[in-house]
Each structure stands twice: as structure tokens, then as C-alpha cells.
Amino acid sequence: MDDFFKLDGITVQFGGLVAVHRFSLHLEEGERVGLIGPNGAGKTTVFNIVSGFLAPGSGKVYWKGNDITGRPVHEITRLGIARTFQNIRLFPDMTVLENVMVSFHHKLRSHFWQAMFGLPSYRREESLLKSEAMTYLEELGLSHLSAERAGSLPYGQQRRLEIARALAIRPGLLLLDEPVAGMNPSESLETAQLILDLQRKYPLTVFLIEHDMKFVMQLCERIKVLDYGHTIAEGTPAEIQQDPLVLKAYLGGACVC
Ligand SMILES: Nc1ncnc2c1ncn2[C@@H]1O[C@H](COP(=O)(O)OP(=O)(O)O)[C@@H](O)[C@H]1O
Ligand SMILES: [Mg+2]
């Protein structure tokens, strides 16, 4: 489907700094595409544009054929685009389960007063959503931790909880900003497997940023490379690993593998 998701000539400027320069991307439904590049290259800024945290100076964002450029975060979320954050953004003092439940607030049909008086319609709805939230925790291997404080989980599990919370909006497009940062190699391998499993169960298109090259190369079908806001390469993992500009930007010439 040609018009599933498209970024067209996105440019973002912060004062005199051009953080992203004419960035374009087209995603097909069900794809896994990676965005890589050195620190400060503009990767998170691209995610901020897609998810509505920032509006671009110029360029357009299209989702399922509609122009969604500059729409606010809650609308973009409702349209089925979910994200996780490079700097984890959980509610540390809430439980693991509650952190997933917050994603449902826009879905609750019951009124504030119904909730306040604990009316049966509210309790029914709440218990259905609870069991849906538990399903996502199970998918991420976190259901046994549902009553724990989110802030007490180790780093790797917090990253997974962010994915569970993102799933709760039933996204069509999932943006993962450094999903395995801080994980050891076996946790990172497990997370790659988990993402593949999720794609078998849910209609997910995955767009991810990651520095762990092994993870990106194994998981992504296509990769884009940013450097100082400019797209310097684009291709399959095999093509990217041999691209001279990429080797230069990343490692001053060594192999990206
Ligand atoms: N809100 C902001 N205000 C000013 N500068 C920003 C802001 N967000 C990002 N930048 C700058 O834009 C550039 C790209 O940042 P970012 O997208 O976070 O890079 P990456 O995720 O590739 O490391 C960096 O130079 C960063 O300092
Ligand atoms: Mg970043």
C-alpha cells in the first residue's frame, strides 16, 4: 500500500541549527525500518515530528493517505501511532499495570461520576480494560510484575513496559526510540525476538532508532542513516554495512557490524 505512511521533505530548525534537513521516508504496512546515525544526528527529532511533539518547519506527514502534519499528540495517538522514549517516561510511583492502564484513558466511555461512585457500568469497563492491559504485559513477559512499582524495575524491563504501554493504544505504527539501550546482548536479542513475535500477533509496522548495530541489522528490513540532519544512506542492512559514507560517519572507516 503506497500511502500507508509517508514523511515528505521534513525540515526542523532550532534557532540556527538545522536538526533535520528534508527528511523523506515511506513505510509499507508491516515493515520494520531502522533509523541510525551518530548522537545529535536528528533521529529523535524525526520521531517527535511523527508523534506530534513537534511541528516541522516545512514538510508533510501522511498517515493512511491523510495529511497529519502538526496534529497534537493525543490526536496522533488516537489515529494509531504510538511511541516509546529514549529517556524512559513511565510513572515511576504507579504500578506496572497502572502504567499500561493510563493508555486507555481516552477509551473509557464511562463518565467521571460513574467512576467516582463505582457504578457497575464503570467497574465492568474497567475490568475489561484491566484484562486487556494484562495481555500486553504477558506479551512483554511482565505480567508477574503487574503489582510492582514501575520505578523499581530494572532498566531493561522498564523499556519493555514502555512497549506494553504503547501496544495498549492498539497502534498501526510503533516508533521505538533506542529500545535496547542499556540492555545486555542476551536481553537485546530477546527483545528483537519479542518484536518479531508481536508483529505476528498484531498488525504492526515498526520504525525504530537504535545504536546497537547487531540488533538493527538483524531486525530491520531497511535502514536510513542520518548525519547532522542529512540522510546520507538508505538501503538493506547489507548495503548499509558497506556504504562508505556510513562507515565514515560512524566509525571513521571501520565496519558497521
Ligand atoms: N527541543 C530542542 N531544542 C533545541 N535543540 C534541540 C531540541 N531537540 C533536539 N535539539 C538538537 O537537535 C539535534 C538533533 O537532536 P536529536 O534529534 O535528539 O538527535 P539524535 O536523537 O539523533 O541523537 C541536536 O543537536 C540537539 O541538540
Ligand atoms: Mg535520540
Image (cartoon, helix red, strand yellow):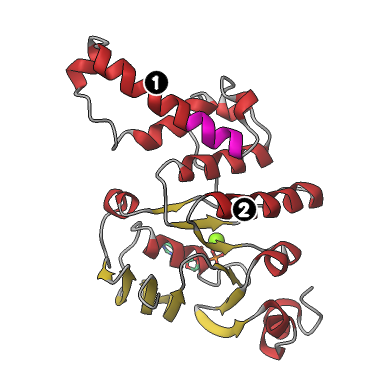
* Disc 2 Cβ-to-ligand 2 distance below 8 Å: no
Q: Check the picture and name the quadrant holding the C terminus.
A: bottom right
Horizontal and vertical percent position of residue 88 = 54, 44
187 or 41, which lies in front?
Answer: 187
- The amino acid sitting under disc 1 is Ser
**Image height of 74 relative to 233, above or below:** above
Asked if residue 217 is positioned above or below residue 54 in the image, the reply reads below
What's drawn in magenta, residue-wise?
133-139
Residue 73 shows in this picture: yes
Quadrant where ligand 2 appears: bottom right
Identity of the residue drawn at 56% across and 19% down: 147
Does the rendering let one see residue 92? no
Q: Which residue is mark 2?
A: 195
Image quadrant where residue 143 sits: top right
Find out whether residue 111 is within the magenta segment: no
Q: Quadrant of the N terminus?
A: bottom left
Residue 127 has which mark? 1
Q: Which residue corresponds to the image point at 60% horizontal and 42% vertical from the top-left?
A: 160
